[in-house]
Image (cartoon, rainbow, N blue to C red):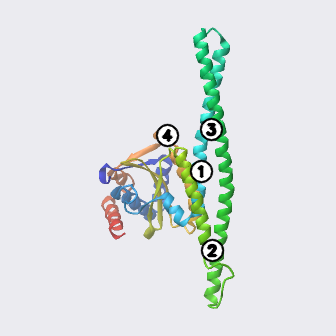
Amino acid sequence: MTGERTRVRMSREVRAWLAALLAEDHQMGRVVGEAVTVLFQGGFEPGAPFVIPLESALRAQHPGIALDHSYQRQLHLSQRVRRSVADLATARRRLELRIGAGGLDPDTLAGTRRQYEEVVAEEARVALFSRRIQAGLNVFAARKEAVKAGYTAALANRTIDEAFAAFDESYVPGRPVDDVAPARAAAADMLRGAAELEQWLGGDTAPEISELRLETSELRLLFAVVSPDTAVLLVVGIGHDDWDRWYEQALPLARDELELEDGEFTGYDLTTFLSEYFPGEEAEIQAAAHLVRTSG
């Protein structure tokens, strides 16, 4: 869904950031405006121009960050299980009080005791399940750090080998030609296992994060689709030398944005977005965004 029916929501913090950027560096602010307009014009779904599911982007180019992102999602799911344990404990205590208070007729007392036994059994089952999930998370956390360290070391070794080879064509490295591949494979294996666990746990309820990437502008825009015609703008990065570091900082911010209440957001269609941030430049911004889309 594209055009005037498409809406983008922005939190107060993101709105303030964009306004400050425009005041400080109007040209850079225009780059962001063109990117948001590309999003309006092209739509949000994977397959739309320049839109990449964040998972795919991270797995392909930043496997260490992908592992961290997966771990955070698993933590979120494990917290749901722990809340279930807490809810069952509350229900058990209420039944205990009801039984202990007395005054129930025999049939009601018998039914309440049966309900109590069912809740106790379910609480024990879910508590055991929660402990097993936590144990699995601990293993995942330790293994992901080892895999990330191996991947970082492999990248460093490859850089060293390339540097030596540039100065000496006869240089032969004393390790496999591509020892980055095994590290990537280990990360991919862990991510597959994590995805299966997440599916088994019922999946994360938070909207999936996608990325609008414009290589020509060195811009990456993280957003989440909250309905077929509405996306939430989360974080924007421009011209970073170290995108790994940017993702490490941007993903927690994106997750925080998704936790905000509805009242924290303002919704825009393309016309209201351009008139608020780029008055008098609407046609130029739209033309530039159209050129980006058609040239890409």
Residue in the image at 53% along x and 62% along y = 58
Residue in the image at 66% along x and 33% along y = 124
* 3D distance between C-alphas at marks 3 and 2: 40 Å
Residue under label 1, please give it: 72
- Mark 4 lies on a secondary structure that is loop
In the image, residue 243 above or below residue 20: below
Residue under label 2, please give it: 179
The location of residue 116, given as percent across then percent down, is 62, 22
Could you tell me if the residues under marks 2 and 4 are in contact, i.e. CB atoms within 8 Å? no
In the image, residue 201 above or below residue 179: above
Q: Nearer the viewer, residue 59 or 188?
A: 188
The location of residue 153, given as percent across then percent down, is 67, 70
Residue type, label 3: Arg
- Quadrant containing the C terminus is bottom left
Q: Is residue 251 left or right of residue 32?
A: right
Residue in the image at 63% along x and 83% along y = 163
Instruction: Classify mark 3: residues with Cα within 10 Å, few (<14), some (14-19) or many (20+).
Output: some
Residue under label 3, please give it: 82
Can residue 279 be seen here? The reply is: no
Residue under label 4, please give it: 261
The location of residue 207, given as percent across then percent down, is 47, 48
- Lower position in the chain sequence, tag 1 or tag 4: 1
Checking the image for residue 139, the label placed there is none
Pair 1/2: label in front: 2
Tell me the quarter of the picture where residue 151 sits.
Answer: bottom right
Q: Is residue 9 left or right of residue 140?
A: left
In the image, residue 129 above or below residue 54: above
Pair 1/4: label in front: 1
Residue type, label 1: Gln
Instruction: Classify mark 2: residues with Cα within 10 Å, few (<14), some (14-19) or many (20+).
Output: some
Residue in the image at 31% along x and 49% along y = 5
Could you tell me if the residues under marks 1 and 2 are in contact, i.e. CB atoms within 8 Å? no
